[in-house]
Image (spheres, rainbow, N blue to C red):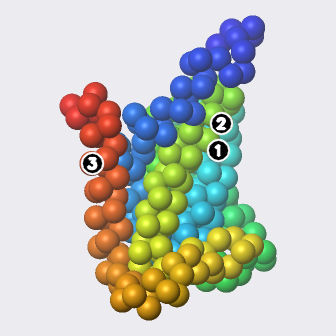
Amino acid sequence: MSDKEPLFSAKNRKLMTNPLNAQNPITIQVLGICSALAVTAKLEPAIVMSISVMFVVVFANVIISLLRNTIPARIRIIVQLVIVAALVIIVDQILQAFAYEVSKQLSVFVGLIITNCIIMGRLEAFALGNKPWQSALDGVGNAAGYGIILVIVAFFRELLGSGTLTLPGLGTLHIIPQFIYDLGYQNNGLMILPPMALVTVAVIIWVQRSRNKDLIES
C-alpha cells in the first residue's frame, strides 16, 4: 500500500465486507463451527463470545503483522500460539472480573478461542504477509462475519427454544407474550440442544447460497 492510499480504500473495505458474505468464515470456509454449536443456546453468551473473538483476532493479527519480518519460519506457529494464548487470558480475566455470570456460561469455550481455526487461519494466511492496518481490518471483518452467524443462530435458538432473548445489561426479555402460550403455543425444546445449532447453520448456508448464486460453485 502506498503512503497516499486512503485508510478505507475500496481494497481495504473489502477486507471487512467480504467475510460478512462471500468469504464468511463459518458458512463458506466452515471454520469456528464448534463455538457456533456450544455457545448459541442464549443470545448473551453468543454476543460476548463474538466480541471476545474480535478482540483476540484483531490484536493477534496486528501483533503478528508487526513481528512478521522477525519471526523465524520454523517457530512461527509457536509464536502465534503464545500471542493468542496471552490475549485469551486477558479476555478471560476481564470476563471473570466484569461479567462473571456470562463467563461461567461460556465455561471452557473462552479458553478454546486459542484453538479457533479462524484466528490461526488469519494469522497464517494474512497477518504474516500484510501490514498492520490491513491485518487489523482483516481481523475485524472475519470476526464480524463469525459473530453475525453466532448472533443469528443464538437469536433463533433462544427465541424458539425458550421464548426469550437474553441481552447484555438487560437480562432476560420475554419476547413471546403469555396469551400466545394460552392459545396453545409451546416452546420448541429441541432448539436449545446442540444439534439444532448445526441445523440452524445449515439453514443459513442454504439461504445465503440461494440468494447468491455465485457461491454455489464455491
Residue 197 at x, y = what percent? 36, 68
Crowding at mark 1 (Cα within 10 Å: few <14, some 14-19, many 20+): many
Give the residue at x 55% y 29%: 15
In the shown orientation, is residue 26 left or right of residue 164?
Answer: left
The amino acid at mark 1 is Val
Separation of marks 2 and 3 at Cα, in angstroms: 30 Å
Q: Circle 2 sits in a helix, a strand or a loop, which is it? A: helix
Q: Residue at x 51, y 78 (%)?
A: 176
Callout 3 crowding tier (Cα within 10 Å): few <14, some 14–19, many ≥20: some
Look at the numbered disc 1 and give the secondary structure of its residue.
helix
> Looking at the rendering, in which quadrant would you find the C terminus?
top left
Marks 3/1: CA–CA distance: 29 Å
Image position of 173 with respect to 31: above or below = below
Nearer the camera: disc 2 or disc 3: 3
Q: Is residue 192 visible?
A: no
Split into 4 quadrants, where in the image is the N terminus? Answer: top right
Residue projecting furthest to the left: 217
**Residue beneath disc 2:** 136
